[in-house]
Amino acid sequence: MTAASPPEILRAPLVVEFPFTRSLGPVQSAFLTGLREGAVLGVKTSDGKVMVPPVEYDPVTAEEIRELVEVGATGTVTTWAWNDRPRPQQPLDTPFAWVLVTLDGADTALLHALDAPGPDAVRTGMRVRVRWAAERTGAITDIACFEPYDGPAGGKAVPHAGDFADAVTGIVAEARLDYVYSPGRAQTAYIAALSERRTVGERCPSCHKVYVPPRGACPTCGVATTDRVEVGPAGTVTTYCIVNIKAKNLDIEVPYVYAHIALDGAGLALHGRIGGIPYDQVRMGLRVEPVWTEGGRYPDHYRPTGEPDADYDAYKELI
């Protein structure tokens, strides 16, 4: 008789994106607006050091810095690394070098891309200049890249008032991370059970806590967890929050409630959305059960079971 084979360990591409809007102070506003206008601005510290990109506070003394200066659009490579496989959204779509460039008149280096035919064409100490983007909006991408340069130096830093018409006052920072993720043995089994509308955790052989979702090992005892335990399906709301801001690409009307739910038999709470009840009636101790949609691979949300609320002492250790 042959034992059943364990499920194949899952692997899948995962993309994490977090674009957020940030406001700019007077220094960063002047720097980015200057790029839009074809000028590179830095700041001068109390000891006369010119910092490009500019900062708002002296890294040595922590004093506020406001003295703006304009530096040259030419400079010297201080160090570099070749990038033979550019990724999406990088400055160039052909192989290029990442370089630190000390612009003429500056004392610190700016990180950007250098357009070069190959690594043999790049060296520390080489002279480069800014290649401006055809359309500039007030962002670091207004510098399309650097390119090799054999002309004269750009001179010293000169004072600049930082005054521009229609100054840039805010930006949207696009943070993105994409990679291949494998949940491992324990969570592969957990996901496989969810496809059968079951919730399976793993019990620590030492402290006997049941982890849902399972982690493959007990973080408290440091031992492997291999004893699988089916929990739920009902559970108890241990704590919750009311969401009032609509998330991008999430088709749920606000306000709604997201809660930590301790499934019956589990040693810690998992999170899930609460539905089937007005948001202002959700409470700690509320008894809930999962609601599955047709073809869903995990519960769409949890709804009240109609049971009396759980006593606080029954779940206080799981908050």
Image (tube, helix red, strand yellow):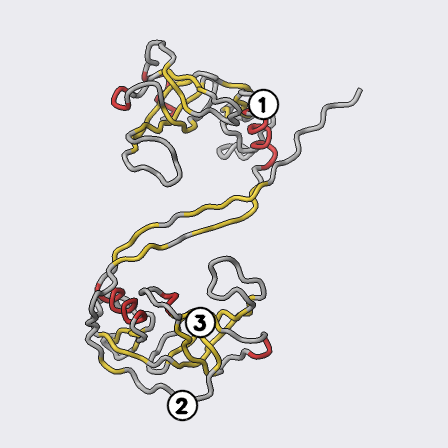
Q: Looking at the rendering, in which quadrant would you find the C terminus?
A: top left
Q: Tell me if mark 3 has few (under 14), some (14-19) or many (20+) residues whose alpha carbon lies within 10 angstroms of its own.
A: many
Q: Looking at the rendering, in which quadrant would you find the N terminus?
A: top right
- The answer to whether residue 153 of the structure is visible from this angle is yes
Q: Is residue 250 above or below residue 104?
A: above
Q: Is residue 193 left or right of residue 1?
A: left
Query: Which label was assigned to residue 152?
Result: 2
Q: Which residue is mark 3?
A: 145
Measure how far apart labels 2 and 3 are at the Cα level.
19 Å
Identity, as a three-letter code, of the amino acid under mark 2? Pro
Q: Position of residue 140 (x, y in %)?
A: 36, 66
Q: Is residue 287 above or below residue 96?
A: above
Callout 2: SS: loop
Identity, as a three-letter code, of the amino acid under mark 3? Cys
Mark 1 or mark 3, which is nearer the start of the sequence? 3
Identity, as a three-letter code, of the amino acid under mark 1? Arg
Measure how far apart labels 2 and 1 are at the Cα level.
72 Å
Q: Number of labelled discs?
A: 3
Asked whether 243 or 307 is in front, the reply is: 243
Measure how far apart labels 3 and 1 are at the Cα level.
55 Å
Callout 3: SS: strand
Q: Which residue is mark 1?
A: 228
The image quadrant that residue 286 belongs to is top left
Q: Is residue 130 left or right of residue 39?
A: right
Q: Position of residue 84 (x, y in %)?
A: 58, 66
Q: Position of residue 294 (x, y in %)?
A: 50, 22
